[in-house]
Image (tube, helix red, strand yellow):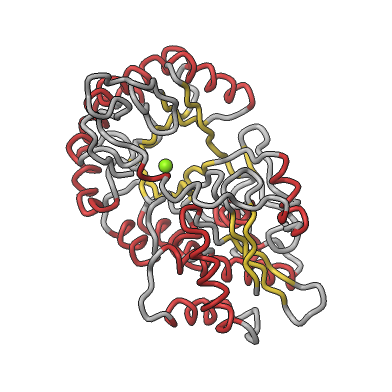
Amino acid sequence: MRAIVTAPEGMPLVVVRVDTSDDGLYGLGCATFTQRYAAVVAALEEHVAPLVIGRHPSDIEDITRQVHYSSYWRNGPVLNNALSGVDQALWDIAGKRAGMPVHELLGGRCRAAVEVYSHAAGATVQDTLDQAQQLIAEGYRNVRLQVGGPGLGTYGAPGSPGGYPRSPHPDGWDAEQYLRATPGLFEAARARLGEGVNLMHDVHSRLTPKQAVVLARALEPYRLSFLEDVIAPELYDRLPEVRVASPVPIAVGEQIGSLPEAARLIRGGGVDLVRFHTSSIGGLTPTRKLAAMCELAGVRTAFHSPGDISPVGVAANLAVDISTPAFGYQESHAYNDATHEVFPGTRVVTDGHLTPSQKPGWGVDLDEKAASRFTPTKFLFEQWATRVRRPDGGLEAP
Ligand code: MG
């Protein structure tokens, strides 16, 4: 069992390769935790590998339970990403042994393809809507809209530096300005794009529960498909009151770092859609259990999938997306050419849809020689989540 780190797009991707005693039979799993990737590698190589080596690769449930419980203290994203790498690699092996794509092992297809959404994020409303129109022309029916603003701007969109020149932190982000400006983006979007496109928005955890309700109510006329990450994870026990007061579906979950936390989110009644980052909750095995729970609870899935999930992790998302009745939406990322070279079989969005590979396992490989050309730059993302401050200099929760 080995952990391979590669950064073909700049972001460090961690992939686990598990080899078996059968000639040429191996599996790949995504263990990417961009902000703490070296910790995941150390967990895998120093602590997890000895638990896995020598086991029969088909005993996925038992092996993953053993890895999970063996640290006694568990449930954090470092150990769960390490676990995900092992878990997904074992599912890849299971598919290859069966001669089937993994989604067939999960019950097969519930839909012909997975409809995805992409991001339009400009400095101005005009820029954002130009991008959205381009995506619609490419076949997307689902678009997340973000627009810049003074200082650092809205999440995902460029800002105007020095937006608050007389404040101690001129590049700050101001919640009140954001609350005033955001409805205008969606009013303009409906006027220009019409009613035939599904629109989303990501708050990125920057509001209080009450501010989240104010925003959700202001957005009601524009019929968003979901409003994402309205409050910080530390406040998730306030989600039920936000959801009850919100006319817009609430989507939360990419910052969840364990299976029990994820299950609590579904049970708690505070979400309409769950946006799990599946490697940070332990991989495919926990995710398929959560998808079944969603199905029974009337909650839908909208899994997180930006550029800091490897194409192997995308394949795992797609296996669940295509096979669960609880599917709602899927985020998508267009990988660069280098990523396609490192990961042969990387899926490509066509007319706003992704389809899982029909090859056995994930259908995604890793060219280790190509991967070795893209070594990660140290300490590039460790502080990424703490770059937002208010105009008065106070740190904003990501
Ligand atoms: Mg998000």
Relative height, residue 218 to residue 398 (above, below): above
- Residue at 53% from the left image edge and 16% from the top image edge: 130
Relative height, residue 388 to residue 163 (above, below): below
- Residue at 65% from the left image edge and 87% from the top image edge: 54
Report x, y in % for residue 354.
Answer: 64, 43
- Residue at 51% from the left image edge and 76% from the top image edge: 64
Looking at the image, which is closer to me, 197 or 10?
10
Number of numbered tags placed on the structure image: 0
Report x, y in % for residue 309.
Answer: 56, 51
* 216 horizontally vs 342: left or right: left
* 210 horizontally vs 115: left or right: left
* 143 horizontally vs 19: left or right: left
Relative height, residue 209 to residue 167 (above, below): below
Report x, y in % for residue 382.
Answer: 44, 51
Q: Quadrant of ligand 1?
A: top left
* 53 horizontally vs 152: left or right: right
| Quadrant in the rendering for residue 173 | top left
The residue positioned farthest toward the bottom in the image shown: 54
Figure quadrant of the N terminus: bottom right
The residue positioned farthest toward the right in the image shown: 23
Looking at the image, which is closer to me, 59 or 172?
172
Figure quadrant of the C terminus: top left
Report x, y in % for residue 367.
Answer: 76, 57
